[in-house]
Image (spheres, helix red, strand yellow):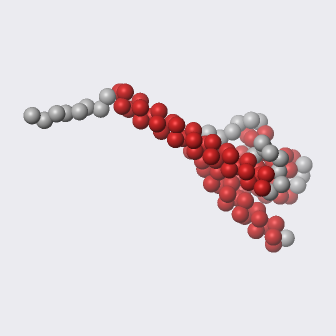
Amino acid sequence: MVLRIEPTATSFIGKNQEMSKVMTWLENIAYAWDEFLNVLLGGLPGQTFSMRAAVARQSGRVWGCVMCAMLAALIQREHCQKTLEGEAPTGLAAIRTGLALLASMIGFIVLVRLS
């Protein structure tokens, strides 16, 4: 006698709920990393680096323009503008934001050191 176990809707939902918890956790890590790097580089607590770069770009600061261009290329188009409008990325975009921010920070530090 062979016992067959068919996947049920509840097992599928359970996997989605677990994946959702993981994604939420990763989004929170990415957001915290964003804020941490901003504070580490002299920004205000509770402010993301994207927001800081967007404000700097609006003020005409060169580093803000460069950083927003990098974020737009690495994360999403008009990322800085969307940040100003309160449209934070979610899901994989948020995770990609954290990783891209790290790469952007390294590029920014190199740019500052070379100038």
Q: How many marks?
A: 0
In-image side of 99 versus 83 (left or right):
left
Q: Residue furthest bottom?
A: 114
Q: Where residue 35 sits: x, y (%)?
A: 73, 47
Q: Where residue 24 sits: x, y (%)?
A: 57, 38
Quarter in which the N terminus is drawn: top left
In-image side of 15 versus 81 (left or right):
left
Quick check: can you spot residue 73?
A: no
Q: Residue furthest top?
A: 9
Q: Where residue 6 sits: x, y (%)?
A: 25, 31
Q: Residue at x 16, y 33 (%)?
A: 3
Quarter in which the C terminus is drawn: bottom right
Q: Residue furthest right?
A: 59
The image quarter containing residue 25 is top right
Q: Nearer the viewer, residue 103 or 57?
A: 103
Please tell me whether residue 33 is drawn above or below residue 103 in the rendered image. above
Q: Residue at x 90, y 49 (%)?
A: 59
Q: Nearer the viewer, residue 86 or 39?
A: 39
In-image side of 102 versus 23 (left or right):
right
Q: Where residue 39 sits: x, y (%)?
A: 79, 51
Please tell me whether residue 49 is drawn above or below residue 63 in the rendered image. above
Q: Nearer the viewer, residue 83 or 99?
A: 99
Quick check: can you spot residue 109?
A: yes
